[in-house]
DNA sequence: AAGAATTGTCACGCAACCGTCACATCGCGG
DNA sequence: CCGCGATGTGACGGTTGCGTGACAATTCTT
């Protein structure tokens, strides 16, 4: 899958200038970039790197963009990617008819860079649909990722975003002891410049909220190791 | 995982590759999928499973898509489904003929998957309330998609089109937290260059109207996540 | 054509939230 | 019982997310 959490965009175009332009703009927008000059390179890149979004020029030497698209979509890695066809032709009649591209989206030249970036973003978020989570339950505590609601014995508890994610991580695997580092990774993401003691503080706040209606402390401190639920 | 709540889409196409492709993409979009390779299978599936939406390829072996559509619409289960004809032809004449036989919508190849999904959703939206004849109701708020009317404790409220759709989206799944991005997708559709903060403004306006006659705020803000109804 | 309604964006302000520190407390080995 | 490192926790400054009034652009009505 994706190595870092920043999305990887594969740009396929045979014109070097075009490639450079798109590359520059998308990099500036915060994406990781990979490029390919023709269909063969593209297919190789897809297999090797598993991009999240593929910008595919309609006109390519050798294999047409259409054919490349079909082949991409027939691979495992390709199915997980959003393909955006980039076409110079705006005429409906010019489009190859009778052929289903399988593209997730298309964009017609001339287009603005802003629109392109917006399209890439839109397809990214469409690609990762709401990870239909089912409610977690440990003891008398319930956490519903869908409604973002935490209850204890029916009582609704109010948690901040970080505490919500923290509780979610802990509840996901009851009994498992998480090190502070693991929790930082899981809850805070790649914000590695954060003091591990911060975890203690948030665990403290979480405990306070969980205990506000009475009941046992559901979070176990494992001295020298970390925290666990249940 | 097969929630009876999630819409069932029947895909009718004689090309296996096409079938697999559509199947995959619509599954990823959160629908339940059923498939058929020809008209006979399609009619059987309609009768047995009562799909909500039927994607019907124009070109089929044996019976034409047109004829299949006619037959589907002549069955009880078929009348309650939205039929979307999928065709390589863009001719106006064909479109008219397609719609005359009872198809609810029409989409021409090549189309983007995003567009297809949008169409399926649009037809579902149009279909659901009419078929069930049910207005949405959350607490003391009623939204009737048929008459395009919103009331709270009997009082008729006046909403602009965007706020109406926004409220509809929120009410469709009470309790579910929608991210701003999801709401943009759902309410604003393909107008993708819209700032996510715009959602806040419209939620604000919606709230103002809903509260104009007194009562509790029915919209819950989930900090760092989005909005939910109820 | 003029007025009304609706829409998207922005700027400002407040409240919630966050990360860090300092100090209190605890647990464990000697 | 002592000492030391690990953990609990109240307080605090800084940041961020969100609510909202204002405004220009656009569309709908009349």
Image: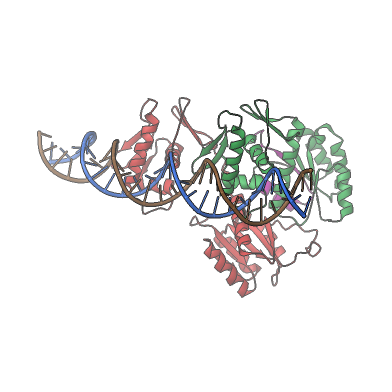
Chain colours: A red, B green, C blue, D brown
User: B198 and B9: which one is in front?
Assistant: B198
Check the image and report above or below for A19 versus B224: below
Q: Is residue A41 left or right of residue A143?
A: right
Can you give x and y, in whole percent of width and height, for residue B18 in the image? 74, 52
Q: Is residue B32 left or right of residue B55?
A: left
Magenta stretch: give its range.
B3-26
Q: Is residue A13 left or right of residue B77?
A: left
User: B44 and A203: which one is in front?
Assistant: A203
Disc count in the image? 0
State the residue at coordinates (41%, 49%): A185
In the rendered view of the protein, which quadrant contains the C terminus of chain B? top right
Q: Is residue A88 magenta?
A: no
Can you give x and y, in whole percent of width and height, for residue B29 in the image? 65, 45
Can you give x and y, in whole percent of width and height, for residue D17 in the image? 48, 46
Q: Is residue B22 magenta?
A: yes
Image quadrant of residue A14? Answer: bottom right
For the question of whether residue A129 can be seen, the reply is no
Check the image and report above or below for A223 versus A103: above
State the residue at coordinates (60%, 65%): A11
Image quadrant of residue B144? Answer: top right
For the question of whether residue B166 can be seen, the reply is yes
Determine the residue located farthest toward the bottom in the rendered image.
A16
Can you give x and y, in whole percent of width and height, for residue A23 in the image? 57, 68
In the rendered view of the protein, which quadrant contains the N terminus of chain B? top right
State the residue at coordinates (77%, 59%): A99
State the residue at coordinates (39%, 38%): A176
User: D16 and B174: which one is in front?
Assistant: D16
């Amino acid at each position: 899958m994706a190595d870092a959490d920043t999305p990887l965009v594969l740009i396929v175009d045979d014109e070097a200038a075009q490639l450079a332009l798109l590359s520059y703009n998308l990099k500036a927008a915060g994406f990781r970039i990979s490029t390919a000059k023709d269909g063969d390179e593209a297919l190789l890149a897809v297999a090797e790197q598993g991009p999240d979004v593929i910008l595919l020029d309609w006109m390519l030497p050798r294999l047409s963009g259409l054919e490349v698209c079909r082949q991409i979509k027939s691979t495992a890695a390709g199915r997980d990617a959003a393909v955006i066809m980039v076409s110079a032709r705006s005429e409906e009649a010019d489009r190859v008819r009778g052929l289903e591209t399988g593209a997730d989206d298309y964009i017609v030249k001339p287009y603005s860079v802003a629109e392109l970036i917006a399209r890439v973003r839109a397809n990214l978020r469409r690609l990762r649909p709401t990870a239909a989570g089912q409610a977690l339950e440990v003891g008398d505590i319930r956490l519903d990722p869908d409604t973002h609601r935490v209850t204890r014995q029916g009582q609704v508890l109010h948690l901040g975003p970080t505490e919500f994610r923290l509780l979610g991580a802990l509840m996901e695997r009851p009994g498992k002891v998480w090190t502070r580092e693991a929790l930082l990774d899981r809850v805070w993401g790649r914000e590695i410049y954060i003091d591990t003691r911060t975890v203690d503080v948030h665990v403290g706040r979480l405990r306070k909220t969980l205990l506000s209606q009475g009941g046992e402390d559901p979070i176990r401190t494992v001295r020298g190791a970390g925290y666990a639920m249940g």
